[in-house]
């Protein structure tokens, strides 16, 4: 029963269907139709958009943090986060103004966006900074475990409950991506990243940065899901604008107080190619954020995390093709595990939606 019909008087709520219909027509209203469930086309749209954006972003990100420019390595991971957020907030502002008739109305208190802006900034910082201390394959394997922390964060933050099959699927996806990544393990797998430092300190710093990334990123997607549920009129562009506005404030404060802003600007002046690399990262980060917010709003944080986890596999395939590495059997085993699990999940959820159709048709 709809909220509208629930507020009708005893005289209006006659057990006769014809009278119910006449009463609604007299009031000039009809019960709102339930929104159509998101389908395979929307999921494919999200999948392709996220993969295209973040495969490019990941490649250039690794290049920026590991490449030797003419005057050395890029000096600030925080500046990379800052430049990403500046372009993202510009895009979000333009689209929001266009969609809402030239008005920048955010239908939620601005403070509610601050927690996920902080966690998003910390996760980006941890991801950039980790490459100084750990190898790229090790970071990739760490990312592959993110599905489980996201589920745990959903249970803690949003009081969500997941059936055992969801946890089994999460473990299988983590296992598959890990096997896929381990196929590319080299002798410097546990090395000190771009710093070249293999000391205990470097190892601990690397693990700390990876933990910061995983925990912060898990919090971000679940908080955004919670915010969408509490404020359903917030669209992905308004979310993008508010979150990135907070992130710019935070990263600007960090850059100015640490002195990294002036050092980085000087470095970019001496290395124009570094500026172009940062622009490329910012563009792909902005398009990626558009797909992130849309995917979380439409499908939820778990589906989003699964898509981003499989990105690690495509990233390795891209690296294999570009640099001419051999395709190893272990990669095939990992891929079969991951895609079989994802296919089973899609099939299971399709069956669940099919079972729910008669309930919707019956008006319950």
Image (tube, grey):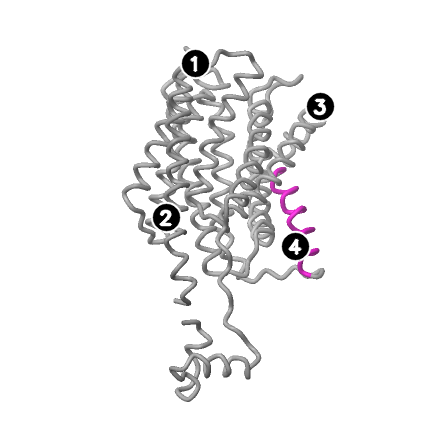
Q: Nearer the viewer, mark 1 or mark 3?
A: 1
**Mark 3 or mark 2, which is nearer to you?**
2
Q: Position of residue 252 (x, y in %)?
A: 60, 42
Q: Which residue is mark 4?
A: 96
Residue 177 location, x and y as percent? 40, 27
Q: Quadrant of the N terminus?
A: bottom left
Is label 3 in contact with label 2 (beta carbons under 8 Å)?
no
Q: Earlier in the sequence, mark 1 or mark 2?
A: 2
Can residue 31 be seen? yes
Q: Which residues are magenta?
A: 83-100
Q: Which residue is mark 3?
A: 270
Contact (Cβ within 8 Å) of mark 1 with mark 2: no
User: Few, some or many C-alpha atoms within 10 Å of disc 4 (few <14, some 14-19, many ≥20)?
Assistant: many
Left or right placement of residue 326 versus residue 100 in this view? left
Count of marks overlaid on the render = 4
CA gap, disc 1 to disc 4? 47 Å
Query: Which disc number belongs to residue 154?
Result: 2
């Amino acid at each position: 029963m709809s909220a509208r019909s629930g507020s009708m008087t005893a005289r209006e709520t006659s057990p006769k269907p014809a009278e119910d219909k006449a009463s609604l027509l007299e009031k000039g209203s009809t019960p709102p139709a339930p929104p159509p469930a998101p389908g395979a086309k929307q999921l494919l749209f999200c999948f392709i958009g996220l993969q295209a954006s973040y495969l490019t972003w990941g490649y250039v990100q690794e290049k920026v943090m590991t490449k030797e420019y003419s005057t050395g390595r890029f000096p600030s991971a925080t500046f990379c986060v800052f430049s990403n957020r500046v372009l993202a907030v510009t895009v979000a502002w333009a689209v929001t103004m266009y969609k809402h008739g030239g008005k920048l109305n955010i239908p939620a208190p601005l403070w509610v966006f601050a927690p996920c802006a902080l966690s998003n900034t910390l996760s980006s910082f941890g991801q950039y900074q980790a490459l100084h201390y750990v190898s790229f394959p090790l970071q990739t394997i760490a990312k592959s475990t993110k599905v489980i922390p996201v589920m745990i964060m959903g249970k803690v933050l949003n009081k969500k409950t997941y059936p055992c099959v969801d946890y089994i699927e999460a473990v299988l996806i983590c296992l598959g991506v890990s096997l896929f990544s381990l196929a590319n393990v080299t002798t410097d797998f546990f090395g000190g990243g771009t710093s070249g430092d293999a000391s205990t300190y470097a190892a601990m710093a690397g693990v700390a940065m990876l933990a910061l990334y995983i925990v912060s990123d898990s919090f971000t997607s679940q908080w955004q899901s919670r915010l969408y549920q509490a404020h359903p009129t917030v669209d992905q562009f308004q979310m993008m604008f508010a979150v990135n506005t907070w992130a710019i404030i935070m990263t600007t404060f960090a850059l100015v107080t640490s002195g990294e802003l002036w050092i980085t600007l000087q470095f970019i002046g001496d290395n124009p190619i570094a500026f172009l690399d940062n622009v490329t990262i910012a563009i792909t980060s902005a398009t990626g954020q558009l797909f992130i917010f849309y995917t979380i709003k439409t499908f939820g944080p778990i589906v989003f995390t699964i898509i981003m986890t499989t990105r690690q596999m495509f990233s390795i395939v891209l690296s294999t093709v570009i640099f001419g590495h051999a395709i190893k059997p272990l990669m095939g085993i990992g891929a079969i595990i991951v895609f079989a699990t994802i296919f089973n999940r899609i099939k299971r959820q399709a069956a669940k939606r099919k079972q729910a159709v008669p309930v919707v048709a019956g008006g319950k």
